Amino acid sequence: MPSLQVRELPDNIYHLLQKKALAENRSLAQEAISILAKGLNTSTSNKSRRAALLQEIEKKSLPETAKHFNPVELIREDRKR
């Protein structure tokens, strides 16, 4: 995972970050990542990133007709044969 080093961070920003991290029960690094993610309109949650990725894969890999099939019905139909 990439890392980021911020040089010449103003004291007031550092203390605000430290205060917010303490209030959120996070480390400075975790709080900085959270604030950056919010500022970039993205999510840091693994679950939401995974869901978005799966949706993207589904759009690219499944033909439009396959999206309307119910897998349970297909299995039942196959078992009847």
Image: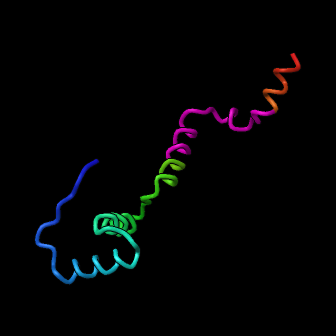
Quarter of the image where the C terminus is located = top right
Residue at 54 percent of width and 49 percent of height? 51
The outermost residue toward the left is 8
User: What secondary structure predominates along the stretch shown in magenta?
Assistant: helix
Which span of residues is magenta-colored?
A: 53-72
Who is closer to the viewer here, 32 or 57? 32
Residue at 37 percent of width and 63 percent of height? 37
Who is closer to the viewer here, 6 or 57? 6
Q: Position of residue 45 (x, y in %)?
A: 46, 57
Residue at 28 percent of width and 64 percent of height? 29
Asked if the stretch drawn in magenta spans residue 60, the answer is: yes
Image position of 5 (left or right of 63): left
Image position of 3 (left or right of 76): left
Q: Position of residue 60 (x, y in %)?
A: 53, 36
Q: Relative to 31, does residue 51 appear above or below in the rendering?
A: above
Q: Position of residue 4 (x, y in %)?
A: 21, 58
